[in-house]
Image: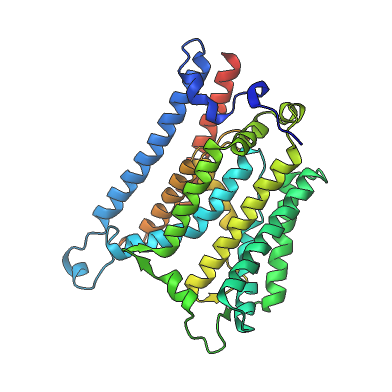
Amino acid sequence: MSESPLSALPAAEPAVPEAARRPADPAAWLVARVDMLLRLGLLGIILLMAAIFTVRTIPTGHLADIGQATFISIDNLQNIGRQMAVVGLIAIGETFVIITAGIDLSVGSLIGLGGIIMASAFLNGWSTPLVIATILLFGLAAGLLNGFLVSVAKVPPFIVTLGMLGILRGFAYLAGNGLSEALSPSGATTSFTVWAQGTFLGVPTIFLVLAVIAIVCAIFLRFTRRGRYIYALGSNPEAVRLSGINVRTILLLVYAISGMLAGVAALLLTARLGAANPNAGTSYELDAIAAAVLGGASLFGARGTIFGAFLGVVLVNVLANGIEIDPANIDPHVQQVVEGVLLILIVWVDQWRKRRIASA
């Protein structure tokens, strides 16, 4: 089907900066300024937390003698980078889905089952490239199934992906018998595990994978026609359909991207740990959704960026890591409280924005 220009579609997120330059549109100007403040504010929160945890973890007195971990140490920063990789990948996938006003709750369970499949494949003597291709195809297939049920069967995304969450997790337990599985019969470290646990120029290799994928996805969303269609679909699906754009194709695309990135996350997490566990990825979907929303994505669609999701992932992981190594032994549940407060605050601001636009 030929695709018509987007001139007839309502302006979506990429068009906001252009609208902001038009003084005759005060609502768009206000939206652009609030977006900028939110992003700078999130970056400011990250820097403030990093500064606090750096000061609090500086060894003093007897703590300096027992080797207390410091937040700013190279080893700890590398650890944060490794922790970011998995949640960061699925947060990018969630951003694609959320921009279309959808949601994907199945990615955490997909990581768990993908890891079990990966371990079984290695134990049966499959080569590393074949295992990687298999897990990527598995993630793609799961994402396409979600997209098909949402776009063709017209089942709400929440119901579809909630059902898939249970299905995939159940299969993970059945296939793995509820137990962890090593990636080799003897439990020896594989070359893939060595790569996933390694660094390149001091940067964890799996973080570099996240960075490359984030850059590619950001370019796709910002500068390609398909990327603009995704934003437009989240803004006004009916206008997109009337413009001759295949809505089903766009929905299949975003859920396929989410599923495939969850497959990449399964590969990286399982390789880094050196074993598969049916519990792997539990609640990761909630962390990914929170990171995307903290980064400016709107659950009502048409808003969200890869850079914002990346900042959200940084915030979540800096908070979790800082609490974990804090010498005061802070209750780890404090992280959930802080994340929850920030999440509610940012969604409230988003609602205020929408009301402001409507009344302008």
Residue in the image at 32% along x and 45% along y: 47
Residue in the image at 69% along x and 73% along y: 173
Quadrant of res 358? top right
Q: Position of residue 211 (x, y in %)?
A: 44, 53
Q: Residue furthest front?
A: 2
183 vs 162, nearest the viewer? 183
Residue in the image at 33% along x and 60% along y: 77
Q: How many marks?
A: 0
Q: Is residue 76 above or below residue 294?
A: below
- Name the quadrant of the C terminus: top right
Q: Residue furthest bottom?
A: 186
Q: Is residue 186 above or below residue 317?
A: below
Q: Position of residue 277 (x, y in %)?
A: 59, 73
Q: Is residue 218 visible?
A: yes
Q: Is residue 333 visible?
A: no
Tell me: 203 left or right of 213.
left
Q: Position of residue 328 (x, y in %)?
A: 32, 60
Q: Position of residue 3 (x, y in %)?
A: 71, 32
Q: Is residue 112 above or below residue 251?
A: below
Tell me: 309 left or right of 63.
right
138 vs 72, nearest the viewer? 138
